[in-house]
Each structure stands twice: as C-alpha cells, then as structure tokens.
Image: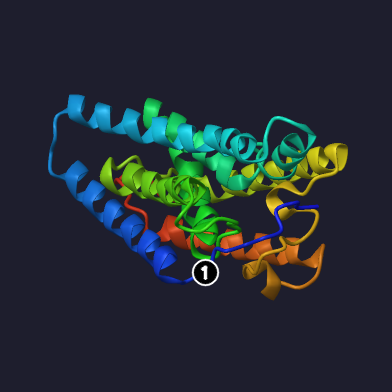
Amino acid sequence: MNVLMDRPFQAFATPHNLAMLVTLFTAVVLIAYARSGPSETKLKRLRYTMGSLLLLAVALDPVLILKRYGLGEHGWEVVMDNSLPFYLCDVVSIFLAFALFTKNQRLVEIGYLWGVAGTMQGLLMPTLWFDHKEIEFYIFFLQHGGAPVAAVFLVWGLRIFPEKGALLRAVFWSLGYITIVMSINWLIDENYGFLNGKPDADTLFDYMGPWPRYLITLQLIAYTLYAILLKIAPKNQESHSA
C-alpha cells in the first residue's frame, strides 16, 4: 500500500503544463540539432549526457525518499513501496540510457516503443506526490520527460530505425516485463508497474475496467500504439516495421 498520503501535485496545473511544454520543446530542438550535422564527437557527448541524466533520475528516486523520510523503518518502507526500479518507466529509462551509450538497435527499438507509448502516460497523468516546490518534481519530469525525448532523439534524430519484426519483439518484451514484475510484486507484496492493482492517483487506468481486466485493455492499447509508432517511424530502404 502506498504510504505517501498527501498529494499537493495537481495534474494539468501550470507547473505540469510547463513541464510538458519543456519536454516537447526539448525533443524538437534535439532532433533538429542531430539532423543539422554536428560532429560525431559532439553527438557522443550529447548522447552520454542524456543517458547519464536518465540513470541519475532513476538512482535519485530512492535517495530522495530516504533524505525526506529518514534511514529508519518508515523511510525504507516508502522506498520498498515506491522507489525500486521495477516500474516500466524505470526500466525503459535504463534501456534508453544504454541505447544512448551504445546506439544498440534493439535497445533503441524497444526504448522508442516503451518510451513513447508507455512513459508518455506517466508524463500526461503522473502518479506524482510532490509539487513544483520540491526537487522530486523536477527529478520526476527529468525521467518521464527525458525518456520520450531520448526515444524520439534516437529514432528521429540519429535515425536508428526499428527493423522488421519490431512489433512482435515488442509484444514479447512487454509480456516478459509483466511476467517478471508481477512475480516480484507477489514475492515482496508490492504493486510495481500497477500490475496488481490500480494506483491511488487518477490515471488512464481508471478508464480501463477493474483488475485484472484493465491489464488486457492496457496491452491492447499498448500494441495498437506500438503499431502506430512503427508506422510513423522513419525507415531506410532495407528496414520495415512488422
């Protein structure tokens, strides 16, 4: 059960809207920059900076929780409830960080689909418990804005294309994530990925039916979004999405 009870954050208030606008602006600027023909050295510095920021955002989550709630039993309880790196947004941030470091096509491919189709839900309807006066607000949007920015930067800016079979691979990756994280949830009695119950905050899950039906609805929506994202992704002559 989530032990963070007070929730001053308000979805679609001015700070949230500004965070989304900054995310959009950053994506457009970085894609334009990558396409402008900078040197490989400059692009490498940019890639490593972006990847490091994503990893930093994931790593800072439990650190900030312990700073706020202390190193005692309560602090560690909050970490167990909220800050282990098992949410999809955490996993895709790590994948995208290593995609930025290595330019590995398979990591780019799943990072693009999860980062846009998945993390964007967290950007639009955050399960965030802190307002813009708290550092947690900025770390949250560094990660949840940074992941989709990194995803489109890699595909649209660096032109690392999804390849044939991408949709089927994404389905297998998604089912694998669900299986592993649901098992972890049962073992540690938590709800990472919101796979064992809906979040306490208002999210798009509220429109998908009760548990476990909403998991089926969620997967159908996800696969549809994957297909759309693969359809609109740039392709070279030898590469076509599934």
Query: Which picture quadrant has residue 16?
Result: bottom left
Secondary structure, mark 1, is loop
Q: What is the x, y in percent for residue 118? A: 55, 55
Using the rendered image of the protein, determine whether residue 106 is visible from the camera's viewpoint: no
242 vs 20, left or right, is right
- Total numbered badges shown on the rendered structure: 1
Q: Residue at x 53, y 41 (%)?
A: 92
Residue 180 can be seen, yes or no: yes
Drawn side of residue 99 relative to residue 44, left or right: right
Front-most of 241 and 31? 31
Closer to the camera, 109 or 182?
Answer: 182
Q: Position of residue 2 (x, y in %)?
A: 75, 52
Q: Would residue 97 appear left or right of 152 to someone viewing this image? A: right
Residue 179 or 238: which is nearer the viewer? 179
Residue at mark 1:
11
Mark 1: amino acid:
Ala
Mark 1 crowd level (few <14, some 14–19, many ≥20, 10 Å Cα): some
Residue shown at 74% from the left, 62% from the top: 198
Drawn side of residue 10 relative to residue 187, left or right? left
- Where is residue 153? Give x, y as percent: 32, 45
Q: Vertical placement of 124 versus 104: above or below?
A: below
**Residue 208 appears at what percent x and percent y?**
70, 72
Examine the rendered structure and indicate whether residue 131 appears above or below residue 102: below
What colouring does the structure picture have?
Answer: rainbow
Image point (30%, 45%), residue name: 236
Instruction: Give above or below for 213 relative to 146.
Output: below
